[in-house]
Image (tube, helix red, strand yellow):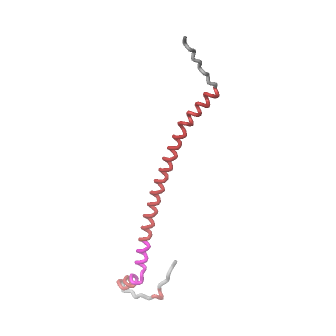
Amino acid sequence: MTKKVKRVKLLKGEKFMYFILVLLLIAIPVVNVYSKALLSETSIKLEKMTSKIEKQESINESLNMQIDELVSLENIEQVASEFGLSYNNDNIKTIE
């Protein structure tokens, strides 16, 4: 006695739903990994840019300190005496 195995036929709508389900099961992890990789890349770019900004701020601060040193009264008097000039405070005009 052999038993007959009945095959259950799937309807067209069921085939389409299974196809969409399998497609979603594959697509969701792929999109998730892609978005995390994109986020990671953006984070790395942000860190590099932040580092460049901090470095430039440090350079700017150093240059401002050098400007303050060069503008100091002692330096002005020294340069004036090197060129045989006299220091007259009334002739100095400050521009801002």
Along the line of sight, which residue is nearer the eye, 75 or 82? 75
The residue at the point 44 percent across, 65 percent down is 56
Task: Determine the residue positioned at 57% across, 17% down.
Answer: 5
In this view, 4 is above or below 92: above
- Classify 5 as above or below 85: above
Of the pair 94 and 31, the residue shown nearer to us? 31
What secondary structure is the magenta-colored segment mainly? helix
Q: Position of residue 94 (x, y in %)?
A: 50, 81
Identify the image quadrant of residue 27.
top right
The quadrant where residue 14 appears = top right
Q: Nearer the viewer, residue 19 or 57?
A: 19
**Residue farthest toward the left in the current orientation of the protein:** 82
Residue 61 within the segment the image draws in magenta = no
Taking the spot 46% from the left edge, 57% from the top edge, the residue there is: 47
Q: Which quarter of the figure is the N terminus placed in? A: top right
* Residue 76 picture location, percent across and down: 40, 82
Q: Image point 64% across, 25% down: which residue?
A: 11
Q: Which residues are magenta?
A: 63-76
Quick check: is 72 in the magenta stretch? Answer: yes
Outermost residue to the front: 1
Q: Specify whether 27 is left or right of 75.
A: right
Give x and y (percent) for residue 46.
Answer: 48, 56
Is residue 39 or residue 17 the one in the foreground?
A: 17
- The count of marks equals 0
Tell me: residue 61, above or below residue 93. Answer: above
Q: Position of residue 89 (x, y in %)?
A: 46, 88
